[in-house]
Every structure is written in C-alpha cells, then in structure tokens.
Image (tube, rainbow, N blue to C red):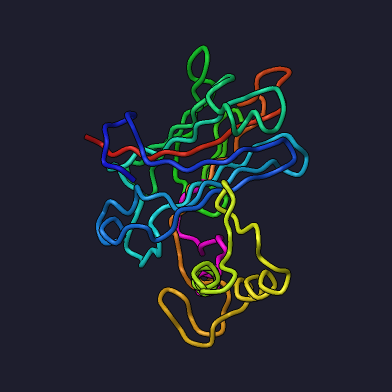
Amino acid sequence: MKKLAFLGGAAAVGCALLFAGRGYAADHLDSDTLGQTTLAMGDINDVYAWMSTDGSKVNLVMTVSPADPGGRDFGPGVQYVFHVTSKTGLPEDVVARPANGVTTKVICTFASATRAQCWVSGVGGVKDYVEGDPSNTAGTTSSSGKVRLFAGRRSDPFFFNLQGFRAAVAEVGRLRTRATNPLVFNQANCPSTITSMEAGTVRTMLSTAQTTATAPCPANQADCFANLNVMALVVQVDKSLLNAPGNVFLGVWGSTHMVP
C-alpha cells in the first residue's frame, strides 16, 4: 500500500477471471511498518474473484491488514476499489493487455465498521449503490438486489507453506552454486538442467511441514497463515453490472487509497 491521493495511484494486486473460473494474486507480510500502524487497513493481502455457481454473479474479495491482531476496523481513512475490465478475446489477452476493454469500478468507503457504502460506477455513471451495516454475516444488499456487501474480520484464506518455500529456495541456491554441475537457468530464470531426483527433492520441501516453528509458521503445520486473521471486504455483484454484452472475460485488480 502506498500513501497516495484519494482515487489517485494505489497499491494493487489483481487477477484475471474467465467466467466459471477463478484467479488469485497475493502479497503477505511484506512491510513491518504498514503492519504496525493504522496504514495496515490499506495494505492489501489478496484479491480474489470468482463466479457464483449459476454464473449470474461475480464475487469480489479484498483482504487487508496482514496478520490482523484484532482491534482494527474499517473506517473513513481508506477507500477500497475493485477495478473490473470486461473483455473479449483469448485468455492470454486478459493478462497481456488488461487495460483494453470496458472498465467498471466498485468503490467502497466506510464511515465506521458498521456503516459503509459501495457504488458500481462505469460508462454512463453509477449503475448501482448499496449502503448499510456490512458487519453481519449476511451483509447488506442494495435495493435492486444486485449488489451485496460484507466487511469484517475473517481467517486468512490464503494457503502458503512459507517454511517449505524457504527450504526449497535454499536448496535451489545450493544446486546453483555447487562446484560440480551447477544448475543452468534459462531466460525465464527457471532451472533447465535440474534432474528429476533434484526436482523431486524441491517438490518435497515445498509440501513438507517443518518441525521447528519459525515466525509466522507454527511447527508441524504446512499452512503458515492458518492461524492468522485478516480484514475482508466482500462484494457480490450481478454479472450484468460488470460485463459488456458479448464479452467473455473479466480482468480484476484491487487498489486502496488513503484519504488526503
């Protein structure tokens, strides 16, 4: 999260969504400074996007406040924005040219943890609007029924074996610098000469829980974030508000903006 102007530049993570599919991007525990101050409510962990089972709605989730300790709440200091671009073309077009297409913004602000408002804004202006108390599990729904909002503390849904990753990185580094037959890397910085046995060792490290606890990972537990909480902003939006006629892809990214 960067401290920038309201609706100006922002910290952001995003993903590409094919209807009936899903995508993820993550950024966890990257800044001790942000994590220790009120700026944590603008520090994005993840942005998730997926379709409802009947394909009629898009679920948008942004988690902030990494390793949330409790005591933090959504409030007037930060604005939250989902940027949704409706596109047609091939799947790789969504990643290669995410700015092309028709963009709709889902913009949310909070007067307090129990008073929020979100509006869906795109070509032609505001398409829908929801306000109310988002803290109950069911959230609050717009008068049209096309937008629903929840915001509150939840268990971090992101799974990552951080200790296993650290061990794998160290092993690849050892193989790369060994005196005999060091690993050779291609232009994508992937090892092109690794043997099946060496690759198997790295894969095992990535999936094995470590017996010694190393923050933030507990001992004997592969998911280092299983015991951590985040603050989650969840917006469910009718697909008709986000997707332009004839388009089949949605590119999604999220940003936070500090109130000046």
Judge whether residue 153 is colored magenta: yes
Q: Residue at position x 38%, y 63% from top? A: 68
- For the magenta stretch, what is the residue range? 150-166
Q: Nearer the viewer, residue 30 or 113?
A: 30
Q: Residue at position x 60%, y 69% from top? A: 181
The answer to whether 146 is drawn above or below residue 177 in the figure is: above
Q: On the rendered structure, is 88 left or right of 35? A: right
User: Where in the figure is residue 110, as x and y percent of width and height?
Assistant: 36, 41
Q: Is residue 225 in sight in this rendering?
A: no
User: Where in the figure is residue 170, as x and y percent of width and height?
Assistant: 49, 72
Residue lying furthest right in this view?
54
Judge whether residue 68 is colored magenta: no
Residue 86, quarter of the rendered image = top right
Q: Nearer the viewer, residue 146 or 213?
A: 213
Q: Is residue 91 in sight in this rendering?
A: yes
User: Where in the figure is residue 47, as x and y percent of width and height?
Assistant: 52, 46
The answer to whether 243 is drawn above or below residue 192 in the figure is: above
Q: Nearer the viewer, residue 61 or 181?
A: 181
Q: Residue at position x 56%, y 28% from top? A: 98
